[in-house]
Image (spheres, helix red, strand yellow):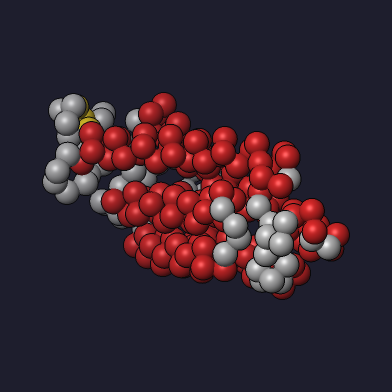
């Protein structure tokens, strides 16, 4: 049905769903931008597991973008949860590997508010899963979203394409930096392989 024919309650639920998606995807974009800034500004190269964590966050964000750019689908929510679980598994593994500092096994990069990125990734994954569960419990599934599109809400319709461009830009920048860091071989944290430089 056209958005103009939706019941007021359904229209409100649709708007809240899209606000949630926009806020969650925007938060992930901010986290990924901060990681990129630390990498470029402080020379903190991500380890292979860190790169997997970034990939999982991009996957979750792009699943949310699918719902923001097209009509809402529970399938995209399932993809989001799948990437959140993948992020949780990778982050827990890395946290347990490095939980006791020893030569060659210390957290990579600086701490933010006392926590390193693997621990933050655990919290981010749990927060994503909990937020989606809470949203589904409070707002229900996609039965209230039929016929609703972000473009039918003026502000959301303008913000969603902008956020999509930001995430695509971040994904491309990360892809280029991974190629420069790793080349065609195994990833490392000693320097940018294609530039031939090592970190002090």
| Quadrant in which the C terminus is drawn | top left
Pick the front one: 191 or 148: 148
Left or right, 72 with respect to 91, comes to right
**What residue is shown at x 14% (from left), y 46% (from top)?**
185
Q: How many marks?
A: 0
Q: Quadrant of residue 3?
A: bottom right
Pick the front one: 58 or 43: 58
**What residue is shown at x 17% (from left), y 31% (from top)?**
194
Q: Quadrant of residue 6?
A: bottom right
Q: Residue 8 placed where, x, y %?
A: 85, 59
Left or right, 199 with respect to 196, comes to right
Pick the front one: 114 or 52: 52
72, above or below 167, in the image: below
| Quadrant in which the N terminus is drawn | bottom right
Q: Quadrant of residue 118?
A: bottom left
**What residue is shown at x 57% (from left), y 64% (from top)?**
73
Q: Is residue 24 visible?
A: no
**What residue is shown at x 40% (from left), y 41% (from top)?**
171
Q: Residue 188 placed where, x, y %?
A: 22, 44
189, above or below 83, in the image: above
Q: Residue 55 placed where, x, y %?
A: 38, 52
């Amino acid at each position: 049905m056209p958005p103009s024919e939706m019941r007021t309650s359904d229209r409100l639920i649709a708007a809240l769903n899209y606000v949630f998606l926009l806020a969650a995807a925007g938060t992930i974009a901010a986290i990924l931008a901060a990681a990129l800034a630390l990498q470029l500004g402080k020379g903190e190269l991500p380890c292979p597991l860190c790169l997997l964590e970034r990939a999982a966050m991009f996957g979750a964000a792009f699943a949310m973008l699918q719902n923001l750019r097209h009509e809402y689908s529970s399938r995209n929510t399932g993809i989001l949860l799948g990437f959140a679980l993948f992020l949780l598994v990778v982050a827990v593994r890395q946290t347990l590997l490095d939980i006791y500092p020893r030569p060659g096994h210390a957290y990579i990069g600086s701490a933010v508010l006392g926590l390193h990125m693997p621990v933050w990734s655990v919290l981010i994954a749990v927060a994503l899963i909990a937020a989606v569960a809470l949203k589904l419990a409070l707002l229900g599934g996609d039965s209230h979203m039929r016929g609703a599109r972000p473009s039918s809400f003026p502000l959301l319709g303008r913000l969603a394409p902008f956020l999509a461009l930001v995430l695509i830009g971040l994904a491309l920048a990360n892809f280029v930096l991974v190629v420069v860091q790793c080349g065609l071989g195994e990833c490392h944290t000693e320097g940018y392989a294609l530039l031939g430089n090592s970190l002090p």
